[in-house]
Image (tube, rainbow, N blue to C red):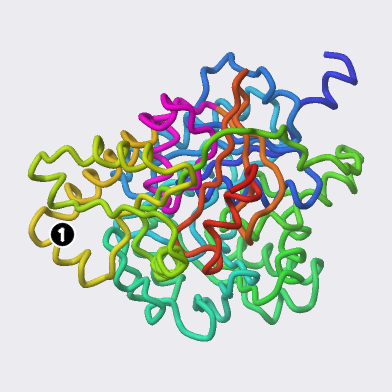
Amino acid sequence: MTAIQEQNRPLLGCIADDFTGATDLANTLVRNGMRTVQTIGVPDINAVGDVGEADAIVVALKSRTIPAADAVSQSLAALEWLRAQGCRQFVFKYCSTFDSTDAGNIGPVAEALLAALDSDFTIACPAFPENGRTIFRGHLFVGDGLLNESGMENHPLTPMRDANLVRVLQRQSKAKVGLLRYDAVARGPAATTERIEALRTDGIRLAIADAVSDADLFTLGEACANLPLITGGSGIALGLPENFRRAGLLPQRGDAASVPHVDGHGVVLAGSASRATNGQVARWLEQGRPALRIDPLALARGEAVVEAALAFAANHDEAVLIYATSSPDEVKSVQAELGVERAGHLVEQALAGIAAGLLARSTRRFVVAGGETSGAVVQALGVRALRIGEQIAPGVPATVTLDAQPLALALKSGNFGGEDFFAEALAQLGGQ
């Protein structure tokens, strides 16, 4: 391989456990000067194409809430593909609210990746201060409150009822879990590296890392420059590009967020039941914009909900909102009647079917709220890879597919974005 070929190979390989989390991470990398491509699922082992021109690759899985053994298998397949592309360091990305259960999947996947990389230590840091997620003495805060008081205790699939992440991760892990405390991080990269070595000596393989500011995340990034694997939220990637620049592997780039313009109709599809998405739906309705609510019970009865939604969209020249977003009490009521898994599956498949139908009718711009919903929609649209563009809101970039006839997408984690996010995203993707 020539020196030029080696320079063009990607440096950082990332595995995300859901689709919106993947774009969140890719957004962080692009903002810090790395050309980034996101693949939807694990590509064929020999597939490179435009992905080979990226500085970083993010493989988006839909593995957050599947059985732990399946999440491990998919993550190891992603790692194998990323290693084949030449990546030098790896990130396992999960939600900034540490969405998981006592059965996994964060611990089992992290341990499997460590073993595959023949490594004995990594950190776990879901902190994202820009969006109010901070970690102090191992406890995760959302804004000024603890995780278990943030609304996440009501999550339908991964209710988070313990803010002590050391305890949460230890219940999922076979290895010993420790804490990389703030007093070490606050003293800078050298002190943090020294503390990491002490934790390793004590037999710690996974350590929750405190971080209350972006400066702490940059410190952690520099201290972890030589770790084969890093795990965390998107914020943990803040300091990684500079490590590659210091090593002479990554040039300064002014065009990392460059993506082509996409024309065409737009739509907003919302499946998340988070507080933020509920507020965004309410704002859209307050402004008198066209919207149609999907009823899971109607789906369960076999009613023609998808066809009705497509007809509704066809009757409007402007972008419409099609949503299943509900209050926590409404969600619980539906789940009590249909079951948690069936209720979620019905909504995801309906919104995916609507997306596919709208694509066939020339819709080219899609704003999607909810990680599980985003995964179902991008699969229905046949999306294989995305080029990552400018940020729309913290954690949410504009993206464009790598197809001959590209689509523009904004894939939003349920809790991200302000009240006007839907309109702002449509505007940034190419107009109202």
Disc 1 target residue = 335
Residue 258 visible here: yes
Is 238 left, or right, of 395 in this rendering? right
Residue 379's place in the image compared with 215, above or below, is above
Residue found at x 25% / y 38%? 306
Instruction: Indicate the quadrant containing the N terminus: top left, top right, bottom left or bottom right.
Output: top right
Q: Residues within 10 Å of mark 1 (few under 14, many from 20)?
A: some
User: Between 113 and 268, which is closer to the camera in this rendering?
Assistant: 268
Residue found at x 48% / y 49%? 110
Residue 220's place in the image compared with 359, above or below, is below
Q: At which x and y percent is residue 53?
A: 75, 25
Residue 192's place in the image compared with 61, above or below, is below
- In the image, is residue 430 part of the stretch drawn in magenta? no
Residue found at x 24% / y 35%? 307
User: Between 291 and 201, which is closer to the camera in this rendering?
Assistant: 291
Q: At which x and y percent is residue 225?
A: 76, 51
Q: At which x and y percent is residue 257?
A: 76, 42
Is 156 left, or right, of 109 in this rendering? left
Residue 98 visible here: no
Quarter of the figure with residue 337: bottom left
Is 351 left, or right, of 227 in this rendering? left
Dot 1 falls on a residue whose secondary structure is: helix
Magenta residue span: 356-384
Is 143 left, or right, of 360 in this rendering? right
Q: Amino acid at mark 1?
A: Gln
Q: At which x and y percent is residue 157?
A: 28, 58
Residue found at x 25% / y 51%? 294
User: Between 36 and 167, which is closer to the camera in this rendering?
Assistant: 36
